[in-house]
Amino acid sequence: MSCIFCRIVAGEIPAEVVAREPEVTAFLDVQPLADGHVLVVPRAHAACVEDLEQAEADALFRAVVRLAGPVREALGAAGTTIGVNNGEATGQTIPHVHVHIVPRWPDDGAGSIHTIFPRRTRRPLGEVAAAIRRVVG
Ligand SMILES: [Zn+2]
């Protein structure tokens, strides 16, 4: 087992675990963007969100919902940014799904999720929506 997150879930390598549930483990990012930067990962290895089984996805997001408030409260934060880099092209460096919960403060100097995109859209909304609906079915 070479996946570092699988090894953390299995307890084979140390991590600052903040919650451990049957299907989900949450621990501090070792390269935190802010104090209290938590990663929430499914027990089962899955590279991307779309690789999760429905029950795994349910358990993962339930854990995110359950942890967001306590993480904010523990750090005295004003909010949290919650995000997933989904696939190597997005900057996902560990190919095991992980949800970032990053505490935020009004003066922390970071932007919203919108600030990471240069807004280079090329197609009308209706055309894009139709293309997605065709694939969703
Ligand atoms: Zn893994």
Image (spheres, grey):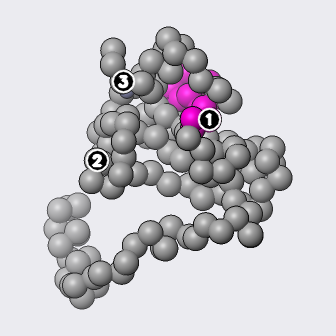
Residue type at numbered disc 1: Leu
Q: Residues within 10 Å of mark 3 (few under 14, many from 20)?
A: few
Which residue is at 50% across, 21% downward?
8
Q: Residues within 10 Å of mark 2 (few under 14, many from 20)?
A: few
Disc 3 Cβ-to-ligand 1 distance below 8 Å: yes
Residue 33 can be seen in this image: yes
Q: Secondary structure at mark 3?
A: loop
Image vertical order of residue 90 relative to residue 12, above or below: below
Q: Quadrant of the C terminus?
A: bottom left
Residue type at numbered disc 3: Cys
Residue 52 can be seen in this image: no
Q: Quadrant of the N terminus?
A: top left
Residue 9 drawn at (x, y percent): 50, 21
Q: Residues within 10 Å of mark 1 (few under 14, many from 20)?
A: some
Disc 2 Cβ-to-ligand 1 distance below 8 Å: no
Magenta-drawn stretch contains 23: yes
Which residue is at 44% across, 27% downward?
5
| Spatial CA span between label 1 and label 2 | 21 Å
Image vertical order of residue 112 relative to residue 137, above or below: below
Front-most of residues 13 and 31: 31
Q: Which residues are magenta?
A: 19-30
Q: Quadrant of ligand 1?
A: top left
Badge number at residue 88:
2
Q: Look at mark 3 in the image and give the residue it sits on.
A: 3
Residue type at numbered disc 2: Glu
Q: Look at mark 1 in the image and give the residue it sits on.
A: 28
